[in-house]
């Protein structure tokens, strides 16, 4: 979904509905400038694949989540 978006620095998913999502594979792949991400509203109950979700997000400093 956001793979390759190397200009994104911060993402806050306050009202992002992931209730029926089953695959988050490569979702933020190569978001190399991403520093902060808030996933507190993410519902990952049905997700079965998060392979390489944050691959090459080497600047990620703050990662907020409840359950993953």
Image (cartoon, helix red, strand yellow):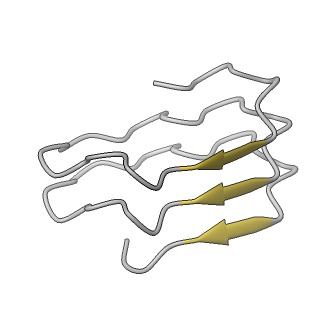
**In the figure, 9 relative to 36: above or below?**
above
Residue, far bottom? 66
> Looking at the figure, which quarter contains the C terminus?
bottom left
> Looking at the figure, which quarter contains the N terminus?
top left
7 relative to 2 in the view: left or right? right
Residue, far front? 15
Question: Closer to the camera, 14 or 61?
Answer: 14
Question: Closer to the camera, 32 or 37?
Answer: 37
Name the residue located 25 percent from the left edge and 48 percent from the top edge.
Answer: 18
Task: Find residue 61 and report its horizontal and vertical position in percent.
Answer: 83, 64
26 relative to 47 in the view: left or right? right
Q: Quadrant of residue 32?
A: top right
Name the residue located 75 percent from the left edge and 56 percent from the top edge.
Answer: 36
**In the figure, 29 relative to 1: above or below?**
below
Name the residue located 87 percent from the left edge and 50 percent from the top edge.
Answer: 59
Total marks placed: 0
Task: Find residue 47 and report its horizontal and vertical position in percent.
Answer: 22, 54
Q: Quadrant of residue 22?
A: top left
Task: Find residue 56 and report its horizontal and vertical position in percent.
Answer: 75, 39
Task: Find residue 39 and report its horizontal and vertical position in percent.
Answer: 49, 61
């Amino acid at each position: 979904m956001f793979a390759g978006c190397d200009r994104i620095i911060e993402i806050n998913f306050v009202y992002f509905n992931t209730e029926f999502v089953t695959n988050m594979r490569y979702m933020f792949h190569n978001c190399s400038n991403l520093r902060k991400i808030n996933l507190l509203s993410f519902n990952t109950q049905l997700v079965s694949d998060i392979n390489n979700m944050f691959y090459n997000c080497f600047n990620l400093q703050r990662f907020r989540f409840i359950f993953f």
